[in-house]
């Protein structure tokens, strides 16, 4: 495989210190890149500028270097690319593929709870009538931008032809029930996770998205966005999550399990790597 043929990334959000789960994910991607003679990139997903903290960004590099990983520079930092995300959103707006959503989280949660398919299905809404929308805008109410799944299906002539490859499993057809009308721009940020990830994976030439099982559903939304924005489609590999001894997921607030805590307690990177199966 040529050097360009395999590009993967580790994309943490700097809202806390990295823990064992992050170490496993970063090592999995790094190891895959090494095995394929490919490239390993780091991306700092800090669009949530209220929650990101500079010390967490610095700690990511420190912790990954301690683990023995290396990555290409410059590192892509999402907060430096708001203009790219705005351009992608503008292209969707121009084609009538997104609509303003003024609803609060609580209102959306309530509607999902009442939906015929039950609370597991994502929210599907609809644009407001123009006069109602104008009234809310004139009141200065904040709004998010949601992708309209119905408009996307019309624009693409259906979703039937869309799939992504889950490595080790094969092609996975897009499932509209996992997509709904996702938020592409949060009320407070002007962008949201899915849009930033899709724009960045393309900008960085990522060919293989390697990340935790918890983001498997996200691939359905992201594949749809790639089709709408005419971006290349990477292959996906969603790895099992490393769980705490009690079977729960690691959370950023779990004291004692961050990589810096482990380090402070004398755990060596070799021991941790072994422990994680590397
Ligand atoms: N920033 C996301 C996280 O910390 C990962 C995004 C991705 O890998 O697509 O969970």
Image: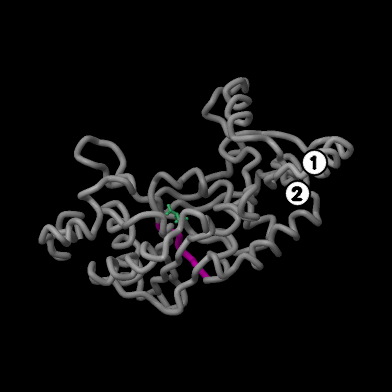
The residues tagged by marks 1 and 2 sit, at their Cα atoms, a distance apart of 24 Å
Does 21 appear above or below 75? above
Which structural element holds mark 2? loop
Tell me the magenta residue range: 205-210
Residue on which disc 2 sits: 97
Left or right of residue 44: residue 62? left
Left or right of residue 255: residue 15? right
The answer to whether residue 13 is visible is yes
* Residue 146 image offset from top left, x and y in percent: 68, 44
* Residue 157 image offset from top left, x and y in percent: 76, 46
* Image quadrant where one finds the C terminus: bottom left
Point 80% across, 54% down: residue: 95
Furthest-right residue in this view: 131
Does 236 appear above or below 102? below
Residue 222 part of the magenta-drawn span: no
Q: Is mark 2 within 8 Å of ligand 1?
A: no
Point 42% across, 48% down: residue: 169
Point 31% across, 60% down: residue: 28
Residue on which disc 1 sits: 139
Viewer-side label of 1, 2 = 1
């Amino acid at each position: 495989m040529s050097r360009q043929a395999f590009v993967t990334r580790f994309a943490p959000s700097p809202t806390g210190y990295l823990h064992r789960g992050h170490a496993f994910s970063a090592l999995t991607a790094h190891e895959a890149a090494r095995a394929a003679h490919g490239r390993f990139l780091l991306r700092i997903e800090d669009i949530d500028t209220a929650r990101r903290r500079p010390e967490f960004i610095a700690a990511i590099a420190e912790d990954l270097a301690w683990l023995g990983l290396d990555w290409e520079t410059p590192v892509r930092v999402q907060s430096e690319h708001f203009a790219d995300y705005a351009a992608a959103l503008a292209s969707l707006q121009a084609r009538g593929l997104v609509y303003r959503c003024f609803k609060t989280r609580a209102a959306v949660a309530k509607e999902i709870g009442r939906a015929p398919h039950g609370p597991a299905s994502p929210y599907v809404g609809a644009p407001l009538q123009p006069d109602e929308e104008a009234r809310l805008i004139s009141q200065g109410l904040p709004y998010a931008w949601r992708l309209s799944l119905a408009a996307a299906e019309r624009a693409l002539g259906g979703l039937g032809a869309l799939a992504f490859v889950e490595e080790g499993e094969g092609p996975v057809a897009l499932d509209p029930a996992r997509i709904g009308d996702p938020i592409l721009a949060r009320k407070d940020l002007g962008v949201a996770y899915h849009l930033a990830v899709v724009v960045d994976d393309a900008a960085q030439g990522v060919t293989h998205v390697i990340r935790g099982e918890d983001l498997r559903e996200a691939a359905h939304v992201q594949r749809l966005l790639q089709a709408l924005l005419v971006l290349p489609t990477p292959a996906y590999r969603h790895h099992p999550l490393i769980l705490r001894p009690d079977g729960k997921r690691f959370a950023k607030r779990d004291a004692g399990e961050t990589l810096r805590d482990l380090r402070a307690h004398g755990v060596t990177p070799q021991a941790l790597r072994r422990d994680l199966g590397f």
